[in-house]
Image (cartoon, rainbow, N blue to C red):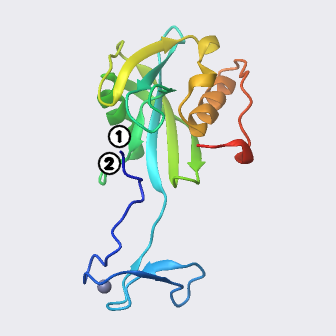
Amino acid sequence: MTSHPHSFSRYCMHCGQRLTTAIPENDTKRRLVCFDCGFVHYINPRPVAGLIPVREDGQLLLVRRAIEPRAGTWVFPGGYMDLGETAEEAAARETLEEANLEVSGLSLLGVYTRPGPGVVVIVYEALALSEGSPGEECSEVRWFHPGGIPWDELAFDSTIAALHDWAKRHGLDAPYRVPTVEERDF
Ligand SMILES: [Zn+2]
């Protein structure tokens, strides 16, 4: 069972009192607040850095997820940023951890918000410097021709949207229609 990215303590991190919800002064939304010491526990979306590795021959690498959520589906390498690193560094680090793959020449592809889980996915593409192999949290890595992207087996709506944009950027057919917000169930 993986924890939700926004799982948090119900207790004040400063004084240990139980938090409650209230609209703080000069605010418009309910927040978790501590009535004892006045601390307001803001909960914000978290940035995720992702990267689409591309070979000289135009094929791109996806990894098969070995963990929930969406175990067994395909996604490009990515994960939560660590404090102290840039988005580019996080994207390259995740690619090394998940696919044992070094890359160079990162280029920003787009930014994709997943409002449900509260993550903002920053996606780059970059040139792959080797073939890669399965690393952390992955059961398999595979190179795909752009025409062979497994659109029906992708992990997240952000995965679909980013690969759609990637295909468009390279003048390729993007046969998959990006789901509307109402259609998204993950
Ligand atoms: Zn407190």
Question: On the picture, is 112 further left or further right than 168?
Answer: left
Question: Which residue lies at the image location 32% right of the left edge and 49% below the top edge?
Answer: 82
Q: Where residue 180 sits in the image (x, y, percent)?
A: 74, 42
Which residue occupies the extreme left position in the image?
Answer: 15
Query: Ligand 1 near label 1 (Cβ, under 8 Å)?
Result: no
Badge 2 element: loop
Position of 123 relative to 4 (above/below) = above
Nearest the camera: 154 or 59?
A: 154
Q: Is the residue marked by circle 2 packed among few (<14), some (14-19), or many (20+) residues within 10 Å?
A: few
Q: Which residue is mark 1?
A: 89
Q: Which residue is mark 2?
A: 85
Question: On the picture, is 109 further left or further right than 76?
Answer: right
Question: Which residue lies at the image location 58% right of the left edge and 78% below the top edge?
Answer: 29
Position of 108 relative to 33 (above/below) = above
Q: Where residue 22 sits in the image (x, y, percent)?
A: 51, 85
The answer for how far apart the CA atoms under marks 2 and 1 are is 6 Å
Question: On the picture, is 121 further left or further right than 181?
Answer: left
**Disc 2 residue type (three-letter):** Glu
